[in-house]
Amino acid sequence: MKILMISDVYFPRINGVSTSIATFKREFETLGHEVVLLAPQYPTADAGEPGVIRIPSRYLFVDPEDRMMKPRAACGLHGRLASERFDVLHIQTPFVAHAMALGLGRRVGMPRVETYHTFFEEYLFHYLPWIPRAVLRAGARRLSRKQCNEVDALVVPSSAMKEVLGRYGVTVPMDVIPTGVNMAAFDGGDGPGFRARLGLSKDRPVLVHVGRIAHEKNIGFLVNVLALVRASVPDVVLIIAGEGPALPRLREQVARLRLRDHVRFTGYLDRDTDLVSCYKAADAFVFASRTETQGLVLLEAMACGTPVVSTAVMGTRDVLVDGQGARVVPDDATDFAAGVAALLANTGLRQRLGEQARVYVENWTAAEMARRQIEFYRKAIAGYRSESVAASV
């Protein structure tokens, strides 16, 4: 199968969408399929990844980490792409990529599949605070309904997101296909060495959070939890790995709560080396986002054998099962802190949950999710051809 992907974001921009695209692309190619990805050009040097075509882009004022592909440059590729006879077009983001894909799909005559990665209803007001939340939520719902119904089939990372889109009025065929984990990628790492580089002893209780430091990730809640955990675990420390627009506010919160000696900010970490070591340096991985369509970092932590303490809201409901590598706790700082403190105090429980985590994640392998995605493509192609034949009669 020949697959064309289009996205408004990809590495070196680090987030869950980039990771998902790279994971599926690698697995598709391992299965013998051909993949071409159109993605923005970034100011930092690109490594020239095979199968990736970079589109000239411009600065995006509402989120400087991102780039916006120049529509004219993107549309200039229509002729070249039309001649390559792709079987399916997979849209990964709802911006320039979506608009370009609609036109290209009509011109070439191939099915358009889209993944709904981001819960925009609970996302936009963090970046457009001058617009009333009710207005933004209503607009996000209308736009999501319109865009989703413009494609031939829709992929969602979790059943919770599928339910939300159904309430919006999305009627195209939908299937739940989360991003899987490549277990072999999490076999290495040096947890003790990572601790040592941060000046942390092997016996100090360590919590870790990995992800973009964005307002919707609810990391400030975890800092409040940390302050409460200190009451029973005085030397606890929280490692926050990532970067993003909420970082200045988070640093201010840490200073205000007098937690500077209990928080380590590491910035982004290399996925092939330091990230795995960071996961393995933790006694527990903590997570409290209310907007995740999946929560891939939870699976990554569990693949490293690190037990998770997390709420189960939106997409994380599908990922986490209490007692199977994770402690699922209420969305309340006091209850969350109690769950963390209990885990830190019980070495046997941590070891047992860590062992269970590795076993549990074997049900979420990247290879299996890729096979499911290919089958979904085949159904979308068959449905598209049937509709085309019916329309021509």
Image (cartoon, helix red, strand yellow):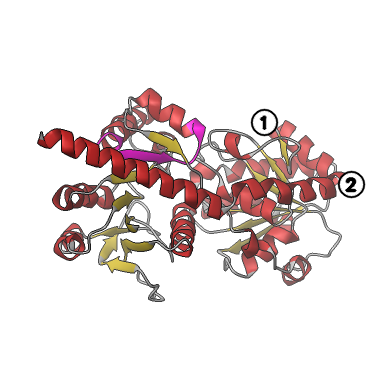
Q: What percent of the width, then of the height, locates residue 216?
A: 50, 42
Q: Mark 2 or mark 1: which comes first in sequence?
A: 1
Q: Is residue 149 magenta?
A: yes
Residue 84 sits above or below residue 352 on the image: below
Q: What percent of the width, then of the height, locates residue 296?
A: 56, 49
Amino acid type at mark 1: Asp
> For the point 63% across and 54% down, which residue is it?
300
Q: Nearer the viewer, residue 377 or 48?
A: 377
Determine whether the residue tagged by mark 1 lies in a helix, strand or loop.
Answer: loop
Determine whether the residue tagged by mark 2 lies in a helix, strand or loop.
Answer: helix
Give the residue at mark 1.
Answer: 332
Q: Quadrant of residue 34?
A: bottom left
Amino acid type at mark 2: Gly
> Could you tell me how far apart the alpha carbons at marks 2 and 1 are, in whole angstroms?
25 Å
Q: The magenta stretch spans which residues?
A: 148-160
* Screen quadrant of the N terminus: bottom left
Residue 326 sits above or below residue 67 on the image: above
- Near mark 2 (Cα within 10 A), the count class, few <14, some 14-19 or many ≥20, is few
Residue 41 visible in rendering: no
- How many numbered marks have been drawn onto this rendered protein structure? 2
Residue 155 visible in rendering: yes
Q: Nearer the viewer, residue 232 or 167?
A: 167
Q: Is residue 177 left or right of residue 351?
A: left
> For the point 83% across and 58% down, which residue is it?
204
* Screen quadrant of the C terminus: top left
Give the residue at mark 2.
Answer: 348
- Near mark 1 (Cα within 10 A), the count class, few <14, some 14-19 or many ≥20, is few
Q: What percent of the width, then of the height, locates residue 252?
A: 58, 51
Q: What percent of the width, then of the height, locates residue 56?
A: 25, 67
Q: Quadrant of residue 67?
A: bottom left
